[in-house]
Amino acid sequence: MTINSREQYHVGNFDEAIALARNVVERDPTYGPAWYVLAMALAAKQMNEEALQAFHKVTELRSSGQSLVLDSYEKIAGHHYRERQYDDAISNAKRGIEAFETVRTQHKSTAGPAEHIGQFYVIMGFSYYRQQHLDEAMEAFIRVTNGSVPGGYSDPDKAQAYYGKGLCNMQEKKFAAALSDLDVAVRKLGPDSGYTAIDALKKKGWCNFNLGNYTAALKDFDKGLKTLNGETAAHRTDLYRGMAYANLALDDKERAISCVNEASVGDSSYKSYGSASDLILIYYVSGDKENAWRTRGGIGYIGIHVEDNQGDSVKGAKIVTVMDASPAARAGLRIGDIVVKINNDANLGGTDFRSRINALTPGMSVTLQIYSQGVQRDVSLDVESVEPIMQADPLIARLLKDSILK
């Protein structure tokens, strides 16, 4: 019966496989292989919670055999990672590693069923990375890149681990080390590895950009674009943005602007919000302040980012970021405050707020009416120039410094 359910699973008859496997486990709840087939078929049907329970059952039963136990721990850890349940992903990856080490101890002459060990460390590494525990993430990735367990660390595992090391080093602005790791990842991944290969090329491009290797950065971004094969518009947008700034660094303003326009194709969100910000920086670095301020709508700055307030009856702009040492921070504005009026005129939302604040002249005062926790109050702020903030933007700070040194 279990053989039949396994065959049904392998030919894609998942409903039949589920029914047959359930018949077996109802008669013998201690038979691990049937629980495993049930789990795999449920997962194929996207019945993830039931699949998870079945995989857990496999890990509890001696009859499952170590290979099925290790594969089940890998499936459980992977599920929790995809669901962003990183603590659970880490704990189950660790259980898988413990199970593997137990087998190695019992079979001293062999490595045991080692094909899962690399994935356990990779899942741990990326889970720690998502939690910003970079030291723990690096330790897990290094176990794979430097590992010597026979049969345990495949090239795909090592490619993922080098990619993870690159991400960690980028977070810590160790761009040379990150570039070295990502270069290995790109070579091991190959062009058919989908998102990871494209993202590794993109990150490699930004490492080269931050190291001043602008021509190399341009090549990385271009290669990423040529690798695209039906991936989301966001990948295309990010790669064209990278090309825009690399071209800007190479003094090709027109090509930089063209790349921003290309980035907008098929990405309505970037076209509506992000493209203008990039064009402003490109004009500014190029010395075309007139077009920079025209595109931005002025030079005014008070140090908050806002979005349309939604979810209640209060109309206005909700504060989502307050910049350190800004006029807004000094005035005591907080995330979650809602701007309902600007100089006693109703604020109609995020776009209205940005256009009116940007148009203000540095040195003048502006009064905001703030709604917070059922209370309204007026707050006066002195408007500053956005130029110092723009000059510190990491996308252009090095370019501005390079232009001064020329």
Image (cartoon, rainbow, N blue to C red):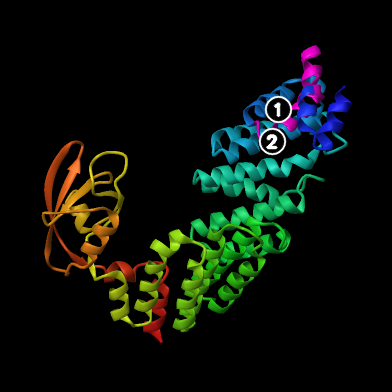
Residue 75: which numbered mark, if any? 2
Magenta residue check for 131: no
Q: What secondary structure is found at the residue carrying circle 1?
A: helix
Q: Secondary structure at mark 2?
A: helix
Counting from the top left corner in percent of width and height, residue 382 is at: 14, 61
On whether residue 41 falls in the magenta region, the answer is yes
Is residue 247 shown above or below 319?
below
Rendered residue at 27%/44% (across/down) = 336
**79 or 128: nearer the viewer:** 79
For marks 1 and 2, the one nearer the N-term is: 1
Mark linked to residue 55: 1
**Tag 1 and tag 2, C-beta contact below 8 Å:** yes
- Count residues near mark 1 (Cα–Cα under 10 Å), then give few for <14, some for 14-19, many for 20+: many
Residue extending furthest toward the bottom: 406
The image shows residue 378 at horizontal and vertical percentages of 11, 49
Q: Quadrant of residue 403?
A: bottom left
How far across and how far down the image is residue 34, in percent?
Answer: 80, 23
Magenta segment boundaries in residue numbering: 20-47
Q: CA distance from mark 1 to mark 2?
A: 8 Å
Q: Is residue 389 above or below residue 254?
A: above
Q: Which mark is residue 122?
A: none
Mark 2, Cα crowd under 10 Å, few <14 / some 14-19 / many 20+, is many
Front position in the image: 133 or 351: 351
Q: Do we see residue 333 in this rendering? A: no
* Residue type (three-letter) at the residue carrying disc 2: Lys
Which residue type carries mark 1?
Phe
Please say if 20 is above or below 162: above
